[in-house]
Amino acid sequence: MLGVDETIVQQFEEKWQSNAGKLLHINHREELEDLILDLSAADAFKEKPIVVGGSLGQWEWIRTWNPEKVSIWSPGDDPEVFRHQCANASLGITGCAWAAADAGSVCLYSQKDSSLLPSLLPPIHVVLIAKDQIVLSFHEGMGKLYQDAHDQGLWPSLVKIVAGPSMTADIEGQLILGVHGPRDIYAVIIDDSIGIQPN
Amino acid sequence: MPITVQLFVTCLADMIRPQAAIAAVHVLENRGIQVEFPERQTCCGQFSYNAGYQHEAAVMARNFVQVFESGSPEDSADIVALSGSCAAMVINTYPQLLYEDALQQRKSETEAREWKKRAEKIAHRVQEWSMWLDRHGEASLAPTDMSLPVVYHLGCHMRRLLPGSERAEEFLKDKGIDAREPENAEECCGFGGTYSFTEPVLSTALADDKLANIQRVVDDAQAVCLTSADLGCLLHLEGRLRRQKSSLPVCHVAELVELADQKKLTPAYVQELVRGGGE
Amino acid sequence: MAGQLPFDERPWPERRDAALQNQTMRHTIGFVTRRFTLVKQEVYRANPDIEASRTVAVGQKRKAIHDLPELLERFRTQVEEHGGHTYLAARAEDAVDIALNIARTNQVKSVIKSKSMVTEEIELNQAFGKEGIAVRETDLGEYIIQLAHEKPSHILAPAVHRNRHQVADLFQEDAAQKKIAPPHSDDIEDLTRYARERLRQEFLQADMGVTGGNFLVAETGTLVLITNEGNADMVTSLPPVLVSIVGVEKMVENWTSLQEIIQQPAMSGIGRHLSSYTTMIHAPKSSGSAEGPEQWHVILVDNGRMALRGTKFEDVLSCIRCGACLNVCPVFREVGGHAYGSVYPGPIGIVETPLLTDFQILPELPSKLCTLCHACQEACPMDISLPQHIVSLRHIVIKRHLNSGMVGWTLKTWARFWGTASGYRRSISLARVMQRFYGKRRNASGLIPGMFAGWGQTREIPQVAPQTFHEWWQDRNQKGE
């Protein structure tokens, strides 16, 4: 992939981590699979499903992992059923529309083919980011959101920007992670040039 | 030709702590600066203004403008104020206050604007005493090897409304007055002008917080006194200290600068300052 | 038209003394506000370009308030076009009626709410409670004070006046009532986990969600919500009916304005580039989507705001509720939010409470809860002239005779004396006579004229010097020193 500015990626990674987000580097597609299964295999999660926020384009192969365990939102599915799966899930996976380096944030659109629930209900959220989705500034990303809506002639009904795990300092000012949303949030930055494409 | 300044002594220094004003005059004269004192001056009116009595403040403000307009032959001498807060009052508030009050008193628009212009002219000439001194007449002074730790309280109005006031501490350090700000220095001491009378409970709660931080500097750095360019804050804090039976000396910065000039910057002389003033 | 705000019936000294006696609250408030202030300063220092963006945001926000009636129309048209419903509520009670009607029409039994100061303003929870509709606050701090039947003490940290043990007691009691497992310990981590599990079920079962709003975008009909906990995402994603209750002043004109202002609440409030979650609602759920409400209602609340347009207090409507002025205010740090007696505490509360209600409640706020230290002026990212407004409000209070006559008498007399040099001299002689009369007696406050009496309650009274500076100067001139 041409034109990816590594300094922007690096800035995103630093800022994301300073926002208490976690970062995963992978070099091969199998690593991603291992990683996610590892994360969801903790004792408390063993029997619980993994939910995926939508057909992830080039990551469609996630479907092939373990049909019993993985539920992927598709247009036409029953929202009640998917919601129930998300509420019980160990881990949620989504892609993102864009990420901003200066704020260490990712932006997710709720559309027919992509659901936000996997980023909200499970205790762990894994967000897959292609390097070329990272823009320098949040300001720029907001401009992209506006442009996307115009290009598609349609605004996503919900847009969500995530800049770190769910947190609170409501009791004695002490910072605690994982109030209502996920306690752990992993950014998986994927460089297409290292063979993540399906076979 | 020597520089001439006009002294705005402020009501509190005049009535309660004249030795601060006397020291301020000595320090200026010691540097060859000619001091004028327009004797018809009273008070800047800030007490009334901040309490919401704008007309009552305007009465004093008009007196101030008239007094300092006529005080000097060329009307252009700098006016040095013995309080950062009072200086800020004249600079930031007078023009609009006198304009609005003139209209309130059913004067014509022309007359109101005239008052505004007069106030602006005065405002341009006003500076706080130590900041003025820092900008003038210090170059010739030899550096000192004295160093006496003191707690320095930079009042809120001087800190926030007079650009450049962050230099005030350095100015004192240059004279051997090792000015140290307490922790949470930017927090109000609770004086607040009339606030200290009308809401004594909170005013005192704030003073107690401030004094606890001041005491820490006294304990940790052996600071010998509490000083400030603002007597309002100082009298409030001193009143509280005395009620609590503390004998920590409290003095205006001018008094310390005079001691430095006289090479008397020692704990004993600082003690004497306070005894000389209090009785 | 004047708005309505709920208020504490206790007189000021009672509210103040209760606050000063609450050491837990004072300690935590002091800790939290100082930390917020520090991180805010750091984020500004580390990102000097924020300042330019902030200045642009202020200008655009001022213009939006100026054009507010037109922008409200644009916003409403946009939302309706996307399938939402909008309402304009002139007063608090109108907003409540609209919300109740929506709930009744949909046979709502349970409501989940994310944090909203406007719903505190209109006392929504109480009104729903009377209808038999259970409202659950889901922001952790709000949930705590809901269990304690209290009001928020800080707009960002509503339960900052309670320590972990007090919270644990509340949760134990709640668990016993619900017959569920109580929190494992007093540990804040355990307490938070209890709240997560306890509220999760309510999120999934609620019939209706209620949010406030941080920004409204007229051009696109978008509502923006900012939280750190993620509860607003739950509220906007899960229940079938969503009601957003928002002050009209939250409007910005277009997407460009939103881009400039959207980071300000987090930067100025908590010193971060963004809060953890920023949620934008644009329309109700489209068919085939996994989440979002089937109905979306936006209630735009005036409640005294529109009347401030065109007055010198108009800039108050630019407030983005970041909390920066509370965090730097020395008085707020002493007494916390409850002492202010209504919904909005701190410097902005001192100004807004009397203005929104046309001085019908709490006229003492401007004089009793501000030392005019100007820290708020320095902190406000929207350049609201808070200290100047506080002085103006004190003036209005006097004009309307809502203040103490004693202070008025003193300051009028003072001006009569000190407006001239001769009066000034006479007053000094008089002070000396008085001083001789009461001598150096402590607690001589009864003998001191007018408002000066207050000083002596807690502090020694300064003495008029034997020789004033005026006298010294004359003396010196005569001697020809």
Image: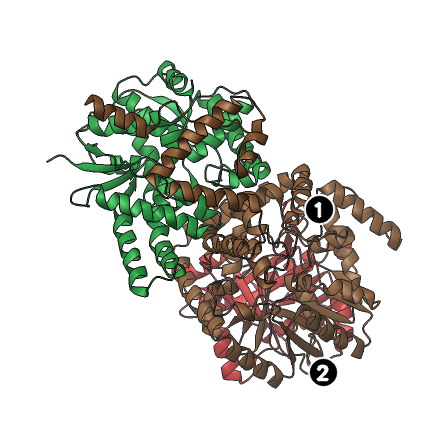
Chain colours: A red, B green, C brown
**Label ID, residue A76:** 2
Locate residue B75, reporting x and y percent. Answer: 19, 45
Residue at the top extreme of this rendering: B268
Q: Give the crowd class for mark 2: few <14, some 14-19, many >=20 residues within 10 Å.
A: few
Q: Give the crowd class for mark 1: few <14, some 14-19, many >=20 residues within 10 Å.
A: some
**Label ID, residue C189:** 1
Between C316 and C457, the one nearer to me in the picture: C457
The quadrant in which the N terminus of chain A is found is: bottom left
Q: In this orientation, does residue B216 appear?
A: no
Between C314 and B142, the one nearer to me in the picture: C314
Name the amino acid, label 1. Answer: Glu
To the question of a shared chain for discs 2 and 1, the answer is no
Cα separation between marks 2 and 1 = 39 Å
Between C430 and C104, the one nearer to me in the picture: C430
The residue tagged with tag 1: helix, strand or loop?
helix
Nearer the viewer's eye, disc 2 or disc 1?
1
Q: Could you tell me which chain the residue with mark 1 belongs to? A: C
Q: Could you tell me which chain the residue with mark 2 belongs to? A: A
Say if B105 sits above or below B261 in the image. below
Residue at 77 percent of width and 50 percent of height? C148
Residue at 55 percent of width and 65 percent of height? A106
The quadrant in which the C terminus of chain A is found is: bottom right
Residue B75 relative to residue B195: left or right: left
* The quarter of the displayed image where residue A196 is located: bottom right
Say if C382 sits above or below B154 in the image. below
Locate residue B149, reporting x and y percent. Answer: 39, 23
Say if B187 sits above or below A147 in the image. above
The residue tagged with tag 2: helix, strand or loop?
loop
Residue C373 relative to residue C453: left or right: left
Name the amino acid, label 2. Answer: Gly
